[in-house]
Image (tube, rainbow, N blue to C red):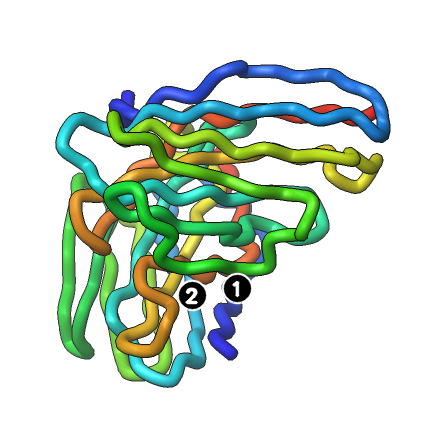
Amino acid sequence: DSGVTQTPKHLITATGQRVTLRCSPRSGDLSVYWYQQSLDQGLQFLIQYYNGEERAKGNILERFSAQQFPDLHSELNLSSLELGDSALYFCASSVDEGEQFFGPGTRLTVL
Amino acid sequence: EDQVTQSPEALRLQEGESSSLNCSYTVSGLRGLFWYRQDPGKGPEFLFTLYSAGEEKEKERLKATLTKKESFLHITAPKPEDSATYLCAVQTAGGTSYGKLTFGQGTILTVHP
């Protein structure tokens, strides 16, 4: 158990809908990262927050947004969902920008 | 752009048969190279961080090494429970990448009893 929690574990929704994925980092970790893992693309970095502020951005679609709250938990919002958004979404956390510890993931299925 | 290439894509070993996985990388400046293990449907599990060429880290049957262009994950006398996907990732120094990890596609290791 990495200490990073993610909810929900599974999410099934329809195209065009909006969903919110939640992540609680390890105690004491200030950085939160979001990654998407699909069969064809592998693990892709989406975005990083550090102590509530956006710090780095990857190839995150404009339909996706994230935020980190004062208690350091983070949410990833996915809107206008398409079939191709079906994937595993992982949250990771770290104390600084060293080792990242990953949560169990949320499996999103868009029908 | 950072690039990470892992080989082989898949590796089948007999229990006790030692081997190595390769991770080749191209980055503007390496801040760190990370190895993770991932079981099906689970999140990646952190194994090692290497920061400079010549560095080595060991954990049980695993040993990671780093050169200026590649890293190796050596598996000595593997057991069936070592079966998993092994992921390599790099982190770039400076610029605006901060904590971003760029992952390779992984090596699927299967160890038969």
State whether residue A38 appears in this view.
yes
- Horizontal side, residue B96 vs residue A50: left or right: right
State the image coordinates of residue B102 (x, y, percent, origin top left): 45, 62
Q: What residue is shown at x 79% (from left), y 41% (from top)?
A: A84
Residue hosting label 2: B22
Residue hosting label 1: B7
Q: What residue is shown at x 29% (from left), y 39% (from top)?
A: A93
- Horizontal side, residue B12 vs residue A29: left or right: right
Q: Chain of mark 2?
A: B
State the image coordinates of residue A67 (x, y, percent, origin top left): 43, 38
Q: Chain of mark 1?
A: B
Q: Nearer the viewer, residue B104 or A78?
A: A78
Q: Nearer the viewer, residue A32 or A44?
A: A32
Q: Are marks 1 and 2 on the same chain?
A: yes
Instruction: Place residue A39 in its image quadrant.
Output: top right
Q: What residue is shown at x 19% (from left), y 78% (from top)?
A: B53
Q: Looking at the rendered structure, which numbered label has been put on residue A54?
A: none
- Kindly state the secondary structure of the residue where label 2 is placed: strand
**Badge 2 local density, few (<14 within 10 Å), some, or many (20+)?**
many
**Badge 1 local density, few (<14 within 10 Å), some, or many (20+)?**
some
- Kindly state the secondary structure of the residue where label 1 is placed: strand
Q: How many marks?
A: 2
Quadrant including the C terminus of chain B: top left
Contact between marks 1 and 2 (CB within 8 A): the answer is yes
Cα separation, mark 1 vs mark 2, equals: 5 Å
Q: Nearer the viewer, residue A43 or B52?
A: A43
State the image coordinates of residue B59 (x, y, percent, origin top left): 17, 44
Q: What amino acid is labelled 1 in the image?
A: Ser
State whether residue B45 appears in this view.
no
